[in-house]
Amino acid sequence: MAAGPQREILRDPWLKKQKRKLLEIDCRGRVVLPGLIDSHTHPVFAAPRLVDFEKRISGASYQEIASAGGGIRSSVAAVRKATRGELAERVLLALNAMMAHGTTTVEAKSGYGLTTKDEIKSLQAIHDAAAQWPGTVAATLLAAHVVPPEFAGKDDEYIETICREIIPRVARAKLASFVDVFCERGAFTLAQSEKVFSAARSHGLGTRAHVCQFTPSKLDSLLSFQPASLDHMDCVASEEISALAENGTVATLLPGANYFLGHHDYPDARRFIDSGVAVALASDYNPGTSPTLSMPFVMSLACTHMKMSPEEAIAAGTVNAACALRLHGRKGSIEPGKDADIAVWDVQDYREIAYWFAWNRCSEVVIAGQHVWSSTRS
Ligand SMILES: [Zn+2]
């Protein structure tokens, strides 16, 4: 992309040659931002979890729902039954809806298959959908989401399967850029998470983790793998935060989950920002705990419930999120040489994007220099 004063840009030799093909979008009175980057999503699922939703309203906790057979495991049964084509269709629907909310780059995880075959099917569905979508998709293997029912009580054996079978096959087929793990009570221990990270590293894949969502955890052993991002981070000790800053790892905060679970507490963004940690915001789009794909809504939650300023929320959904995906060389800002991924907002002041909460003000989307979406055409 070229960026700068109009007179200079029009002198660009390539632009001069293409002059006839150029489309001019009049953005006067509107706000132009880099395309938003949603750096944490779980789009490969087959159905919403409405029973869980109702149970939670009547007082059941996340852990109680999981032990009653709901939660992640109920999504697993549905994904195993679904075909690759059915899943790809759902992923593409989500990607298009994300684009209509200004999102041009998405990280998408597997994690509801939990067998070699079904995790590969999920990642293939992500790739099939991404091939039909103009934006950029970074795929992540999340086989270590929860212990599947057939491995109940044998979680170390499941970890072995992930490390010896699933990760090598996914790496060989180039189906993912990252490996993720849910390091949490009721999911996987720190020692098991380290094994997963170690297998990922030896197969040339990047690492990221769900950690400290419900219970605190030491982070130094995970940080030694140089993960691109640690996500959720609701309950983190202060000494862990300084380690994070030193390591250059992004903290990706996911307030959509706190909102939907009805929590009063939100991740303490100020502690991270004031300690020099780069904070990213993401939707955590998933059927159990965060069925939203609206980054503007997430940015609004960050302002109202996490005391982030509107500027900080925008940086967290663009340039910092690009770092969380190791795509900052190409994405996250409007700069010469980067991909021309741009979202235009039908507001006069950038602060309005988070101010008009749960209201999508995105009006145009440009991806790689192509005008791909307009609110007036949809
Ligand atoms: Zn997640």
Image: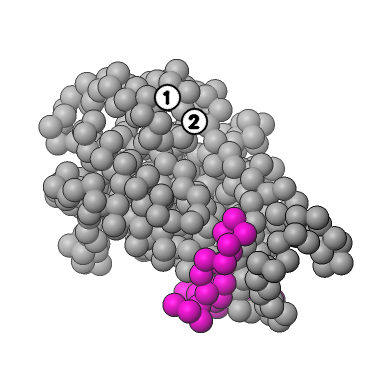
Q: Is residue 158 above or below residue 211?
A: above
Percent coordinates x, y for residue 59 in the rendering: 24, 63
Q: Amino acid at mark 2?
A: Gly
Q: Quadrant of the N terminus?
A: bottom right
Percent coordinates x, y for residue 12 in the rendering: 81, 57
1 or 2: tag closer to the N-terminus: 1
Q: Which mark is residue 275?
A: none
Judging depth in this view, the residue of 231 and 365 nearest the camera is 365
Q: Quadrant of the C terminus?
A: bottom left
Q: Which residues are magenta?
A: 349-378
Q: CA distance from mark 1 to mark 2?
A: 7 Å
Percent coordinates x, y for residue 283 in the rendering: 45, 57
Q: Which residue is under mark 2?
A: 206
Is residue 283 something one can see in this rendering?
yes
In percent of the image, x 47 and y 74: which residue is there?
A: 358
Is the distance from the Cβ of mark 2 to the nearest ligand 1 atom less than 8 Å?
no
Q: Is residue 350 above or below residue 40?
A: below
Residue 263 is covered by the magenta coloring: no
Judging depth in this view, the residue of 7 and 249 nearest the camera is 7
Q: Amino acid at mark 1?
A: Ala
Q: Look at the image and name its color scheme.
A: one colour
Judging depth in this view, the residue of 62 and 26 nearest the camera is 26
Report helix, strand or loop for mark 1: helix
Report helix, strand or loop for mark 2: strand
- Left or right: residue 357 compared with residue 143: right
Q: Which residue is under mark 1?
A: 200
